[in-house]
């Protein structure tokens, strides 16, 4: 299994692509495709047929996946940062390289 520094629920900064400069929360990490789905980023129009859940059908706007290399994790101060790993009290933790603070 591939290991990524970004997890579901993290706040990330988009550093490349049409939504460059956007910030959002990670909704899902697609490990097999090296992609993430970020809230409010890379919105696409999806045509849907009528269903019990959506009886009207029509065009629905939703987030599409972007490559994980196009996002950076944000530290507590709101700046993009690289992620480091270290062992503290027998537990492996992630920390922001810019500030040295632990990422929760």
Image (cartoon, rainbow, N blue to C red):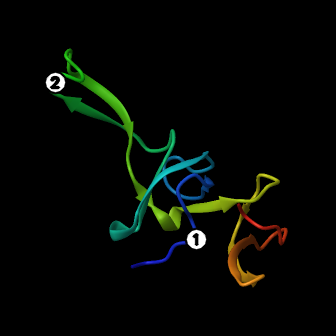
CA separation in Å, label 1 and label 2: 38 Å
Q: Secondary structure at mark 2?
A: loop
Query: Which residue appears at 72% of the width and 84% of the height?
Result: 90
Q: Which mark is residue 5?
A: 1
23 vs 92: above or below: above
Residue 82 place in picture, x, y as percent? 69, 71
Q: Looking at the image, which is closer to me, 5 or 61?
A: 5
Disc 2: which residue: 51
Residue 43 place in picture, x, y as percent? 41, 39
75 vs 47: above or below: below
Q: Mark 2 or mark 1, which is nearer the start of the sequence?
A: 1
Residue 68 place in picture, x, y as percent? 48, 65
Q: Is residue 87 left or right of residue 100?
A: left
Q: Looking at the image, which is closer to me, 73 or 28?
A: 28
Q: Is residue 6 left or right of residue 74?
A: left
Query: Which residue appears at 49% of the width and 77% of the height?
Result: 3
Query: Which residue appears at 82% of the width and 54% of the height?
Result: 77
Q: Looking at the image, which is closer to me, 80 or 4?
A: 4
Q: Is residue 53 left or right of residue 37?
A: left
């Amino acid at each position: 299994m591939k290991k990524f520094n970004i997890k579901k629920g993290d706040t990330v900064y988009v550093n490349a692509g049409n939504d460059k400069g956007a910030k959002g929360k990670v909704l899902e990490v697609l490990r097999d495709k090296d992609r993430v789905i970020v809230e409010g980023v890379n919105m696409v129009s999806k045509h849907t047929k009528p269903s019990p859940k959506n009886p009207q059908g029509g065009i629905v706007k939703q987030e599409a996946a972007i490559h994980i290399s196009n996002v950076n994790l944000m530290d507590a101060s709101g700046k993009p940062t690289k992620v480091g790993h270290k062992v503290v009290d027998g537990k492996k933790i992630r920390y922001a390289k810019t500030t040295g603070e632990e990422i929760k």
